[in-house]
Amino acid sequence: MIEIDWEASFQAHVGKLCEWWVNRPADFDIVLNADERLRLQRRSLRLKSTNCEIEKAIGRTRVARIEEKREDQVVDYRLHMQWLIKQSGRFYLEERIEDRQAVLRGSSIVADGLRTPSLKKEEGTPASAPSASGKDPKAGHFRGSYNRLNAVRYAEVWWNRRNPAFPKIENDCTNFISQCLFAGGIQMNGQPIRNRGWWQQYSNWSFSWAVANNLRWYLSRSGNLIGAVETDKPDKLVPGDVICYDFEGDGRWDHNTLVTALAPSGQPLVSAHTYDARHRDWAYTDSPAWTDRIQYKFFHIRDGK
C-alpha cells in the first residue's frame, strides 16, 4: 500500500535529518529544498563559531493534510525538533515547531521545506513607522514592578501553544511577547486609543501590543510604561528582556523575542511565536527571513516601578 510506503519513507527522512544534526557529515544526501539547505548550513556555521555541538536530535511529526496532485502526494506536516546542545561542557535543550510541506513521488520524497507564514502587513499597522522621539503620554504613571521570573514562566508554558484568554493573531510574535510582559506584572494603559500606550482589551489592542514594528519603537520611547532601556550588546541581557529584529535592515522591524535563558557562554537564548521556538540562539541566522542586512535592538526591562 502507498500509505505504508509513505510512512516508512517519511520517518526515514526525519530520522536522517536528526542524524545529520549530530554528525553533520560533508556529504549532504538529505532531500531538502535549496533554501532549507542554506538555512542548515548557516546554523552549522553558527554552531561552530559558538563552540556548540549537538549531542542528540529528536524529531516528532504530525501530519495535518495530504493532497493528491497527479502522480505526487503533497503532505503538510508539523515537525517538533529537539536538540540537546553542549557548550563548554554544559548542556541546554533547544526546541522548535515548524510547519512544513513534503512532496512524495511513489514512496520517495522529492522535496521538503518550510511552509512560510504569510508576510502580509500585520493587522493594525499604521501607514508609516511611529516616531521614537518624545515621551510616552502616560510617562511617570505606575507601571507595576516587573517579575521577570513570571514572564519567563509564562513563555515556558505557552511557547508552543496559544492562550485563549488573548486575541488570536496570525503573525503572533509580538502578541506573545506582550503576553509575557503582562504576565511579568507590567500594567496596561492607554485604552481605547490604539496609538497610545500598551494594552489589549477583548478583541482590540494597541499597535504596540501586537505589531512588531510598533513595539520596537514604543520600547525606545522615553518613559515607556514597560520600563525598557536599550543596551548595546546581547550579553548584557538577562532572562525576561526583549530582542527586536529588522531582517531586511530597512528600518521596519519584523519580529520580537523574549530572552528565556542564557547559554553556557552567557549569550541569550530566546523563545518566540510564529515559528514557535524555545531557547533558540538569539542571532536567528537560520531563520528563513534572515539576511546579511539584519539589525537588532536589545532592551533590558527594569525590575523596579
Image: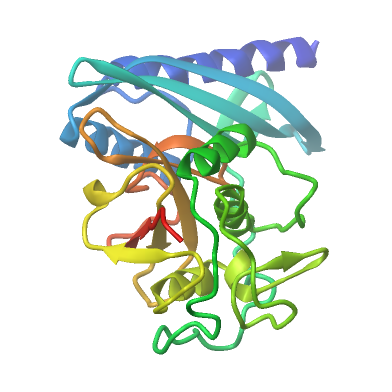
Residue 24, quarter of the rendered image: top left
Query: In the image, is 122 to the left or to the right of 227?
Result: right
**Residue 87 visible within the image:** yes
Residue drawn 58% across the image and 71% down it: 208
Q: Nearer the viewer, residue 92 or 117?
A: 92
Residue drawn 70% across the image and 57% down it: 170
Q: Nearer the viewer, residue 52 or 220?
A: 220
Q: Residue 128: x, y in percent?
A: 53, 88
Indicate the colouring scheme.
rainbow
Q: Is residue 27 above or below residue 214?
A: above
Q: Residue 173: x, y in percent?
A: 57, 54
Q: Nearer the viewer, residue 42 or 6?
A: 42
**Residue 101 visible within the image:** no
Residue drawn 66% across the image and 68% down it: 199
Identify the image quadrant of the N terminus. top right
Q: Is residue 51 above or below residue 178?
A: above
Q: Residue 251: x, y in percent?
A: 38, 77
Residue drawn 17% across the image and 28% down it: 51
Query: In the image, is 173 to the left or to the right of 287?
Result: right
Query: In the image, is 228 to the left or to the right of 115?
Result: left
Residue 243, quarter of the rendered image: bottom left
Query: In the image, is 49 to the left or to the right of 112?
Result: left
Q: Is residue 35 above or below residue 57?
A: below
Q: Residue 91: x, y in percent?
A: 31, 18
